[in-house]
Image (cartoon, helix red, strand yellow):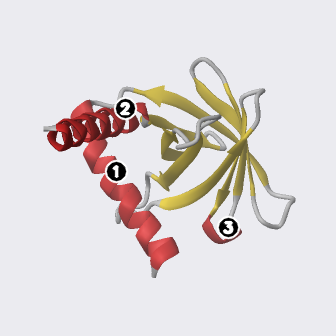
Protein backbone atom coordinates (compact mmCIF):
# COMPACT_ATOMS: atom_id res chain seq x y z
CA UNK A 1 0.00 0.00 0.00
CA UNK A 2 2.80 2.36 0.92
CA UNK A 3 4.55 1.64 -2.40
CA UNK A 4 1.39 2.41 -4.37
CA UNK A 5 0.96 5.71 -2.51
CA UNK A 6 4.58 6.71 -3.20
CA UNK A 7 4.25 5.73 -6.85
CA UNK A 8 1.03 7.73 -7.25
CA UNK A 9 2.59 10.77 -5.55
CA UNK A 10 5.58 10.54 -7.88
CA UNK A 11 3.34 10.31 -10.96
CA UNK A 12 1.28 13.32 -9.83
CA UNK A 13 4.41 15.40 -9.19
CA UNK A 14 5.86 14.44 -12.56
CA UNK A 15 2.63 15.36 -14.37
CA UNK A 16 2.45 18.70 -12.55
CA UNK A 17 6.09 19.44 -13.38
CA UNK A 18 5.62 18.48 -17.04
CA UNK A 19 2.50 20.65 -17.37
CA UNK A 20 4.26 23.62 -15.75
CA UNK A 21 7.31 23.26 -17.98
CA UNK A 22 5.20 23.13 -21.13
CA UNK A 23 3.00 26.04 -20.10
CA UNK A 24 6.00 28.17 -19.25
CA UNK A 25 7.36 28.13 -22.84
CA UNK A 26 6.20 31.39 -24.35
CA UNK A 27 6.18 31.52 -28.16
CA UNK A 28 5.90 34.89 -29.89
CA UNK A 29 5.69 35.82 -33.56
CA UNK A 30 6.99 39.07 -35.02
CA UNK A 31 6.78 40.49 -38.53
CA UNK A 32 8.58 43.49 -39.88
CA UNK A 33 11.29 44.74 -42.18
CA UNK A 34 15.00 45.24 -42.55
CA UNK A 35 15.79 48.61 -44.11
CA UNK A 36 12.07 49.21 -44.61
CA UNK A 37 12.16 47.00 -47.71
CA UNK A 38 12.99 43.41 -46.87
CA UNK A 39 10.04 41.73 -45.12
CA UNK A 40 10.97 39.26 -42.37
CA UNK A 41 9.24 36.95 -39.91
CA UNK A 42 10.81 36.14 -36.53
CA UNK A 43 9.69 33.34 -34.19
CA UNK A 44 10.96 33.75 -30.62
CA UNK A 45 10.39 31.35 -27.73
CA UNK A 46 11.10 32.19 -24.10
CA UNK A 47 12.18 29.00 -22.31
CA UNK A 48 12.39 28.76 -18.50
CA UNK A 49 15.58 27.43 -16.99
CA UNK A 50 15.16 24.22 -15.02
CA UNK A 51 16.97 25.68 -12.03
CA UNK A 52 15.09 28.99 -12.04
CA UNK A 53 16.36 32.44 -12.93
CA UNK A 54 15.93 34.34 -16.15
CA UNK A 55 14.69 32.41 -19.18
CA UNK A 56 16.74 31.77 -22.28
CA UNK A 57 15.49 32.27 -25.82
CA UNK A 58 15.29 30.12 -28.91
CA UNK A 59 14.81 31.99 -32.16
CA UNK A 60 14.53 31.60 -35.92
CA UNK A 61 13.74 34.07 -38.66
CA UNK A 62 13.33 34.16 -42.38
CA UNK A 63 13.26 36.55 -45.28
CA UNK A 64 9.69 36.46 -46.55
CA UNK A 65 10.82 36.78 -50.18
CA UNK A 66 12.38 33.32 -49.87
CA UNK A 67 9.82 30.98 -51.42
CA UNK A 68 11.59 27.89 -50.02
CA UNK A 69 10.48 28.82 -46.48
CA UNK A 70 14.11 28.59 -45.33
CA UNK A 71 14.67 29.74 -41.76
CA UNK A 72 17.88 30.96 -40.10
CA UNK A 73 18.70 30.11 -36.51
CA UNK A 74 19.65 32.91 -34.14
CA UNK A 75 21.65 32.75 -30.92
CA UNK A 76 20.02 35.18 -28.50
CA UNK A 77 21.45 37.08 -25.55
CA UNK A 78 19.77 39.90 -23.65
CA UNK A 79 20.07 42.15 -20.63
CA UNK A 80 17.71 43.62 -18.04
CA UNK A 81 17.15 46.77 -20.15
CA UNK A 82 15.26 44.68 -22.77
CA UNK A 83 18.15 44.92 -25.21
CA UNK A 84 18.68 41.83 -27.34
CA UNK A 85 21.50 40.70 -29.57
CA UNK A 86 20.65 38.00 -32.09
CA UNK A 87 23.49 36.41 -34.01
CA UNK A 88 22.77 34.45 -37.17
CA UNK A 89 24.19 30.96 -37.44
CA UNK A 90 27.76 31.14 -38.79
CA UNK A 91 27.77 34.86 -38.11
CA UNK A 92 26.16 35.89 -41.39
CA UNK A 93 24.60 38.88 -39.64
CA UNK A 94 23.73 40.35 -36.26
CA UNK A 95 20.65 42.15 -35.00
CA UNK A 96 20.88 44.47 -32.01
CA UNK A 97 17.34 45.19 -30.89
CA UNK A 98 15.49 47.10 -28.20
CA UNK A 99 12.27 45.44 -27.08
CA UNK A 100 9.35 47.83 -26.75
CA UNK A 101 5.62 47.59 -26.19
CA UNK A 102 4.89 46.84 -29.87
CA UNK A 103 7.84 44.57 -30.67
CA UNK A 104 11.47 45.36 -31.43
CA UNK A 105 13.47 48.07 -33.16
CA UNK A 106 17.16 48.30 -33.84
CA UNK A 107 19.76 47.48 -36.46
CA UNK A 108 20.99 44.57 -38.53
CA UNK A 109 24.76 44.53 -39.05
CA UNK A 110 26.55 42.76 -41.89
CA UNK A 111 29.65 40.76 -40.87
CA UNK A 112 31.83 43.39 -42.58
CA UNK A 113 30.84 45.71 -39.71
CA UNK A 114 30.10 48.67 -41.93
CA UNK A 115 26.77 47.77 -43.53
CA UNK A 116 23.98 48.54 -41.08
CA UNK A 117 20.26 48.53 -41.74
CA UNK A 118 17.30 49.55 -39.61
CA UNK A 119 15.07 46.75 -38.24
CA UNK A 120 11.45 47.15 -37.15
CA UNK A 121 9.49 44.15 -35.83
CA UNK A 122 5.91 44.19 -34.63
CA UNK A 123 4.32 41.52 -32.48
CA UNK A 124 1.80 39.53 -34.52
CA UNK A 125 -1.07 37.36 -33.35
CA UNK A 126 0.05 33.74 -33.15
CA UNK A 127 -2.94 31.37 -33.18
CA UNK A 128 -2.50 28.32 -30.95
CA UNK A 129 -3.16 26.18 -34.02
CA UNK A 130 -0.02 27.63 -35.71
CA UNK A 131 2.39 27.10 -32.80
CA UNK A 132 3.08 23.49 -33.80
CA UNK A 133 3.89 24.61 -37.35
CA UNK A 134 6.47 27.14 -36.11
CA UNK A 135 7.88 24.64 -33.61
CA UNK A 136 8.41 22.24 -36.53
CA UNK A 137 10.19 25.00 -38.49
CA UNK A 138 12.40 25.63 -35.46
CA UNK A 139 13.18 21.93 -34.92
CA UNK A 140 14.08 21.48 -38.59
CA UNK A 141 16.24 24.63 -38.61
CA UNK A 142 18.12 23.63 -35.46
CA UNK A 143 18.56 20.09 -36.79
CA UNK A 144 19.96 21.37 -40.07
CA UNK A 145 22.31 23.90 -38.47
CA UNK A 146 23.43 22.14 -35.29
CA UNK A 147 22.89 18.40 -35.62
CA UNK A 148 24.11 17.53 -39.11
- Which comes sooner in the sequence, label 2 or label 1? 2
Q: Do tag 1 and tag 3 residues touch (Cβ < 8 Å)?
A: no
Q: CA distance from mark 3 to mark 2?
A: 36 Å
Residue 118, visible in the rendered structure: yes
**Image spot of residue 8 (x, y percent):** 19, 37
Which residue appears at 50% of the width and 41% of the height? 47
Name the foreground residue: 132 vs 61. Answer: 132
Which residue position holds label 3? 92
Name the foreground residue: 109 vs 39. Answer: 109
**Image spot of residue 49 (x, y percent):** 56, 42
Q: Residue furthest front?
A: 1
Residue 20 disc label: 2
Q: CA distance from mark 1 to mark 3?
A: 23 Å
Left or right: where 7 falls relative to 34 = left
- Which comes sooner in the sequence, label 1 or label 3? 3
From what the image shows, is residue 91 above or below residue 50?
A: below
Q: Secondary structure at mark 1?
A: helix
Q: Secondary structure at mark 3?
A: loop
How packed mark 1 is, by other alpha carbons closer than 10 Å (few <14, some 14-19, many 20 or more), is some
Quadrant where the N terminus is found in the figure: top left
Name the foreground residue: 23 vs 89. Answer: 23
Which residue position holds label 1? 135
From what the image shows, is residue 95 above or below residue 66?
A: above
**Image spot of residue 97 (x, y percent):** 71, 38
Quadrant where the C terminus is found in the figure: bottom left
Amino acid sequence: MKKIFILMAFVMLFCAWKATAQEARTPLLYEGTIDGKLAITLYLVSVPRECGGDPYYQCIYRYNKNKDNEWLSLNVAYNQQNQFIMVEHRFSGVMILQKNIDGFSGIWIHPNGTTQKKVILRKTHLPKTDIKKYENYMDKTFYNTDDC
